[in-house]
Every structure is written in C-alpha cells, then in structure tokens.
Amino acid sequence: MHPMVGLVGGRLLRGLVVLWLLSVMAFVMVQALPGTPVDVLAGPYSDAETRARLTEELGLNDSPVIQYFRWLAEVFQGSLGTSLYNGLPVSSLIAERLVNTVELAVVATLVSVLWGVPFGAFAALHRGGIVDRIARSGTFLGLATPVFVLGVILVLAATTWFPAWPTLQYVPFADDPASNIKSLLLPALALGLPLGSTICRYMRTSMLDVFEQDYMRTALATGASRRHAMVNHGMRNASAPVVTIAGLQMAGLIGEAVLVENVFAIPGVGQLTVNSLQNQDYAVAQACLLLLGAVYVLMNFVVDLTYPLVDPKVGALR
C-alpha cells in the first residue's frame, strides 16, 4: 500500500472521530445555556399551558440523550434539523450566509499573505535594517491586538476620517461588486492583519534558518545575490513550516469571523451563531458550532496533504 494512502486514511479516520467529539461538545454546550427556546418563543408573560404545549411540540420533554441522537440522525441525513425560532431548515439558513463568511475569509487570507510573506522574507533579507524593524514592530502589534478590538479601531478611524465609507453596510457581491469589496475591506483587514503577523514572524525565522544552509552558501559563493538566492532557492524551503502555521491560522479565521461579523454587521455564519445562541435556537447553534469545527478539521487535513508538496524532503520520505 502506498504510504500516502495510509496517511490519507489515518487522517480521515481521526477527522471523523474529532467531528463526533465536536458534535457531543456542541450539543452539551448549547444545552448548558441558561433558559430554553420556550422562554424565547412563548415570552415572559405566557401561561403554563402554552409553555407545556411548546415544550411538547419541540421535543424538549425527551431526555438529552434522545435529543442528541435525533439531532445527529438529522445531521447524517444532511438536513441539520429545523430552526426552533423560525421553522426554516438549518441547512438553508447556513447556506445563504456561508457565502458571505467564505468571501470574508478569502479576502482576509489574501490580505494576510500579501502582508506576511513578502515582509517576512525581506525582513530576513535585511536583518537588523529598517525593513526588519518595521516588520517586527508590525507583527508585535498585530499579535497583541485582538481582532474585535482592531475591528472597533478600524470602524472608529473610518467613520472619523472617511465618513462616506460603508463601515457597517454590507453589500452582497451580486448587487454591487465594487461596493461589496469596499464593505469587506475593513473586516478583512481586522481578520487578515493578525494572521499576516503570524505568517510574517514565521517566514522571517524560517528564511533566516534557510540562509544558514549549505545550498544557500553555495548559491551565494557562485556569485548570486542574496535576493536572487532567496527567490530562487530559499522561498520554497522556507515556506514549509509557514504553510503549516498559516493553514492552522486560516482555519481559525472562521472562528474569529464570529467576532468580526458582529462588529461590522456582516450577515454571515458568525452572526448567525451569535443570534442563535441569544434566541436559544438549539439546532442552529449546534450546527454552526459543528461547522466551525469541521472547517478546522478540514484545514488540518489539507495542510497534511499539502506539506509534502511544499517541502521536498518530506515529499521524498513519503
């Protein structure tokens, strides 16, 4: 059996186990929230008969174990259940918002790569110089600032200096592509700059290590400039550990989008998660939490498959 077949099979099996554990954790966490959906649907002034009827209709009289397996069966059927708040299928609620979250994550990833990779490489190339100092200072600020704080700062700055900028007015791409990009720029910066700081830091460290390798010394001894050697010989080898870190960090983008989408009023999965928790909408909240975990597992899987392609040494071993 080819080693890659065993690698893929093992990763898939571990991913399925992790997803099952995530489903249990999501169910337990949502069930542990104070109150029930009946409190939201019936209102504070409802009578006992109304509350009892709603509890029976929603199946909340069943034991938590029965409720969990009923929800898990719906997940396997692909329906993810029905919203207790508005009666709509959970899958459709997530599908119509997932596009916005994915678009935000893609633009944020582009921002992080454009900031992290070149600044990290040139910081290593000019170690101790002005570029290196700017890059290190930027990474420190990016790593030390939470995404929601950075988001609030960007909103305040935009409303102060650019009052016409659509800070809290998300526009779908299908309606107006130009306005869509403008409305995504600030939230993408809030998400992408911290991730880019991590990429920049690891890219700098990895590139400095590559410059000490024998093949780089040989390239420099043959007359190649440091910049030429970095681009033609160093970038791929320096990118191997960066791919791992960036992949895991990009998976975390979906989780951090929960905060950013609520700061910038973007109708994505993050905003849906918060709204469902506030409304005690068990099915939607559990599905959103499971989706966030599934994205993280998927990104880990992709990183494991990509790493041998990026690192020639690992690819040769496998």
Image (tube, rainbow, N blue to C red):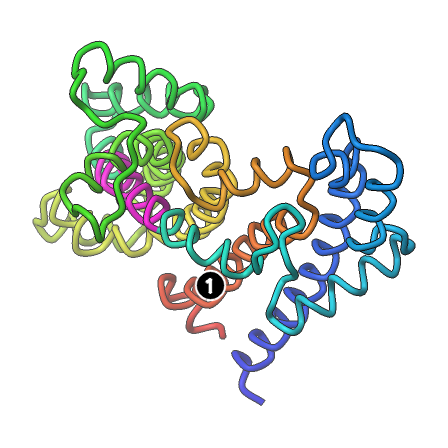
Q: Nearer the viewer, residue 128 or 83?
A: 83
Mark 1 residue crowding within 10 angstroms, few (<14) / some (14–19) / many (20+):
some
Instruction: Give the residue displayed 23% in from the left and 41% down from the top.
Output: 114
- Is 70 rendered above or below residue 130? below
Q: Nearer the viewer, residue 259 or 235?
A: 259
- Is 111 rendered above or below residue 96? above
The three-letter amino acid code for the residue at tag 1 is Val
Span colored in magenta? 103-120
Residue 184 horizontal side relative to residue 43, left or right: left
Give the residue pinned by disc 1.
302
Residue 77 spot, x, y in % from top left:
65, 74
Residue 28 horizontal side relative to residue 222, left or right: right
Residue 86 spot, x, y in % from top left:
59, 49
What secondary structure is found at the residue carrying circle 1?
A: helix
State whether the magenta stretch is mostly helix, strand or loop.
helix
Quick check: is 114 in the magenta stretch? Answer: yes
Residue 313 horizontal side relative to residue 36, left or right: left
Quick check: is 252 in the magenta stretch? Answer: no
Instruction: Give the residue displayed 80% in from the left and 58% down from the top.
Output: 68
Residue 242 spot, x, y in % from top left:
39, 47
Q: Nearer the viewer, residue 5 or 284?
A: 284
- Is 6 rendered above or below residue 139? below
Instruction: Give the residue displayed 64% in from the left and 64% down from the top.
Output: 15
Instruction: Give the residue displayed 87% in from the left and 44% down from the top.
Output: 52
